[in-house]
Image (cartoon, rainbow, N blue to C red):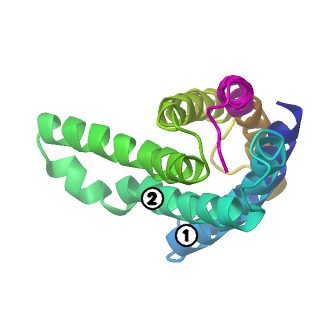
């Protein structure tokens, strides 16, 4: 929990700064997606450091590359609602709700399924349990982030205040994600000790 909290917190500094600097600008989506790569890379390194204790034969480059690419895709998906706000405003409530559920599912899948595929490739037979753990951890983490940042962000705030709020909310999110996903690492360790992991 300590390692991944530190990794996600450090990685989220980039998106927090970029998000505040490019809000409402034409290049906000591209900038956010690029910042997502930074976040995914730092998070991936921290996750690999812990996972390497359980799966020592999994290369760091593989895990980190997949995590960074997944974060990039997740940020793109996360930006879709704001890009298509005009469409949703005119769409029926049922369509909007169904689309929101679909995008939410795609967002969670973009982070959890690629990582589960890597774990499967490196010997974790029950890797698809990680989809549940990872998805649950990001649902909880994003909820904590929104509950922390949304009431504090106000129009007209200084740039530094906006960034600081984002970083503080990001740390709260990181701790939540680390706590939930840490449960999955415990299960991985049990699998390793029981001989379910093979190089």
Q: What secondary structure is found at the residue carrying circle 2?
A: helix
Q: Residues within 10 Å of mark 2 (few under 14, many from 20)?
A: some
User: Which residue position is annotated with label 1?
Assistant: 28
Across and down, in percent, residue 67 comes to: 62, 58
Check residue 76 for magenta coloring. no
- Asked where in the image residue 150 lies, by quadrant, the reply is top right
User: In the image, residue 151 lies at what x, y percent?
Assistant: 63, 30
Indicate the quadrant where residue 145 lies. top right
Q: Is residue 28 above or below residue 174?
A: below
In the rendered image, residue 182, in percent from the top left (x then y), is placed at 72, 28
Q: Which residues are magenta?
A: 176-199
- Separation of marks 1 and 2 at Cα, in angstroms: 9 Å
For this view, does 31 lie left or right of residue 15?
left
- Tell me if label 1 and label 2 are in contact, CB under 8 Å: yes
Left or right of residue 61: residue 33:
left
- Using residue 54 as the reference point, say whether residue 101 is left or right of it: left
Q: Give above or below for 130 relative to 73.
A: above
In this orientation, which residue lies closer to the viewer: 66 or 127?
A: 127
Q: Residue at x 84, y 48 (%)?
A: 49
Residue underneath mark 2 = 79
Q: Nearer the viewer, mark 1 or mark 2?
A: 2
Type of secondary structure dominating the magenta stretch:
helix
- Residue at 67 percent across and 30 percent down: it is 195
Local SS, label 1: helix
Q: Is 140 positioned to the left or the right of 131 in the image?
A: right
Regarding residue 12, the answer to whether it shows in the image is no
Q: Nearer the viewer, residue 95 or 197?
A: 197
Image quadrant containing the N terminus:
top right
Name the residue: 23% across, 35% down.
97
């Amino acid at each position: 929990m300590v390692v991944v909290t530190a990794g996600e917190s450090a990685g989220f500094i980039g998106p927090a700064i970029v998000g505040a600097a490019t809000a409402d600008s034409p290049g906000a989506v591209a900038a956010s997606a690029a910042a997502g790569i930074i976040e995914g890379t730092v998070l991936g390194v921290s996750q690999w450091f812990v996972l390497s204790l359980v799966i020592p034969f999994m290369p760091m480059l593989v895990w980190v590359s997949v995590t960074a690419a997944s974060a990039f895709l997740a940020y793109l998906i996360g930006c879709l609602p704001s890009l298509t706000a005009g469409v949703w405003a005119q769409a029926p409530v049922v369509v909007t709700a169904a689309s929101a559920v679909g995008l939410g599912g795609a967002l969670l899948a973009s982070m959890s399924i690629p990582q589960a595929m890597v774990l499967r490739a490196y010997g974790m037979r029950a890797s698809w349990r990680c989809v549940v753990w990872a998805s649950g951890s990001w649902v909880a983490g994003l909820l904590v982030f929104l509950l922390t940042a949304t009431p504090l962000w106000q129009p007209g705030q200084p740039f530094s205040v906006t960034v600081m709020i984002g970083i503080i909310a990001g740390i709260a999110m990181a701790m939540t994600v680390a706590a939930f996903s840490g449960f999955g690492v415990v299960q991985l360790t049990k699998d390793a000790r029981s001989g379910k992991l093979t190089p």
